[in-house]
Amino acid sequence: MVWDSVARFRRGAYVNSKVSRETVRSRIMVFHTTGGWFGSGEIVFPLSLPLDQQRRMVSEEQYYLSALIGQDLDSLMYAAERYRGWGRSWSSVAFAIETAWYDLSGKVKGVPLYELLGGSVRLSVDDYLSVSEPSIKHVRDRLKAGDLSRKVIQLKLGIGSLSDDVEQVALVLNHLTNTQTLLADANGKWSVGQACEVISKFDDPRVIWEEPCSVYEENTEVADLTGKAVMVDQCVGEVVLAKRAAVDGVVSSLTIKPAYLGGLSVAHDVRNYCVSLGMKMRIDGPWCGDIAAAAILHLAVGVPAELLIASCDLREPLNHRVDLKGVIQLGDNLISPPRGSGLGIDPLDSVMGDPEVTYSI
């Protein structure tokens, strides 16, 4: 069964240095077995993916989902592995199908999904706040509204001029305590020279400069030239590059996004590799619905506290039609995945209404 989900951003258009979007679209899938088990997955289309390509990928569903009818459980994993090789736009499809396999497997074994990813070392993780505003005025208004109590605040940069970026970083830092962390995220917008120019204005250990440039080598150059903490994100969106960043040790941290890497299994591999080398990380993904958000949190709770900068309630900025309770809010800005076997999310049928399409024998 497949449902189409379109969620609108609650604060108006979401803007960063790459895109401006008013909605997020995903495809929610539930696979049923003859034994009465079910597993859920969510295809999350990247905000940067053109709408015509989204529509083309939706039209392909009838072929790759029909091919899974009548197959055994492990066919989901084989399919996910195949789609990972089809290019980065298919990584989210691989992620969704693989998530359904983990959900099904956890239910069959009667264990939460994180147990299939090596277990949990903690019950909850810090939820960071992402601030993405189109102008300095909007940033000021957001700061006046408060809600800066979380340990980690992400500020999207690169939307205006370099002087705007400098002013926004200074504004936010003035509102933070000495124990908070600011992720100053340019989303790869700057050149090496521009990044060094902005970073030179600050000598503040609370700042981590996230993805200043679009290419891994340029980000390491920025880290070398400035001597400041640099986090890499989508420039290491492939397993080989993510592991290289951990081995090189030039950047201070990296972001692991299972939906972009192509599934929980490869993200789990990268996570464990980073842990073995003492590389700090953030685990999250694109803005999404409950199923993808829950899957990502199941991965995050397996990271030792000293190595996890934060994770995120990836539903937070969106108005979803239904609440599937994929993220548990524990208070004190702590979040956890749902309790229960597999993803821990209840059957969707009674909540989501009739599916858009059903594939069956």
Image (cartoon, grey):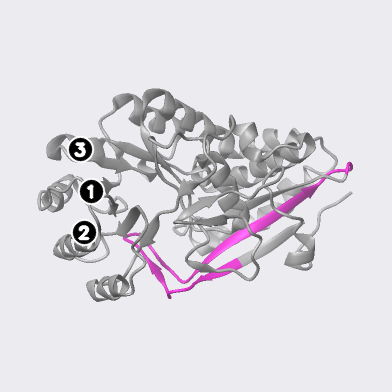
Towards the viewer: 158 or 348: 348
Q: Main secondary structure of the magenta part?
A: strand
Determine whether the residue tagged by mark 1 lies in a helix, strand or loop. Answer: loop
First in sequence: mark 2 or mark 3?
2
Image coordinates for residue 291, horizontal then vertical, percent: 63, 53
- How many residues crowd around disc 3 within 10 Å: few (fewer than 14), some, or many (20 or more)? many
- Does the residue at mark 2 contact the one at mark 1 (Cβ under 8 Å)? yes
Image coordinates for residue 290, horizontal then vertical, percent: 61, 57
Screen quadrant of the N terminus: bottom right
Q: Quadrant of residue 349?
A: bottom right
Towards the viewer: 287 or 63: 287
Give the number of the disc on residue 206: 1
Q: Nearer the viewer, mark 2 or mark 3?
A: 2
Determine whether the residue tagged by mark 2 lies in a helix, strand or loop. Answer: helix
**Does residue 205 appear anywhere in the picture?**
yes
Towards the viewer: 213 or 283: 283
Image coordinates for residue 180, horizontal then vertical, percent: 29, 52
The three-letter code of the residue at mark 3 reads Ala
Q: Residue drawn at (63%, 50%), measured in percent from left and top?
A: 338
Q: Residue drawn at (33%, 74%), measured in percent from left and top?
A: 145
Give the number of the disc on residue 173: 2
How many numbered dots are placed on residues in this image?
A: 3
**Is residue 26 part of the magenta span, yes or no?**
yes
Q: Which residue is mark 3?
A: 223
The three-letter code of the residue at mark 2 reads Leu
The three-letter code of the residue at mark 1 reads Arg
Q: Residue drawn at (86%, 51%), measured in percent from left and top?
A: 360
How far is mark 1 from mark 3, CA to CA? 16 Å
Q: Quadrant of residue 307?
A: top left
Determine whether the residue tagged by mark 3 lies in a helix, strand or loop. Answer: helix
Which segment is the magenta one? 6-35
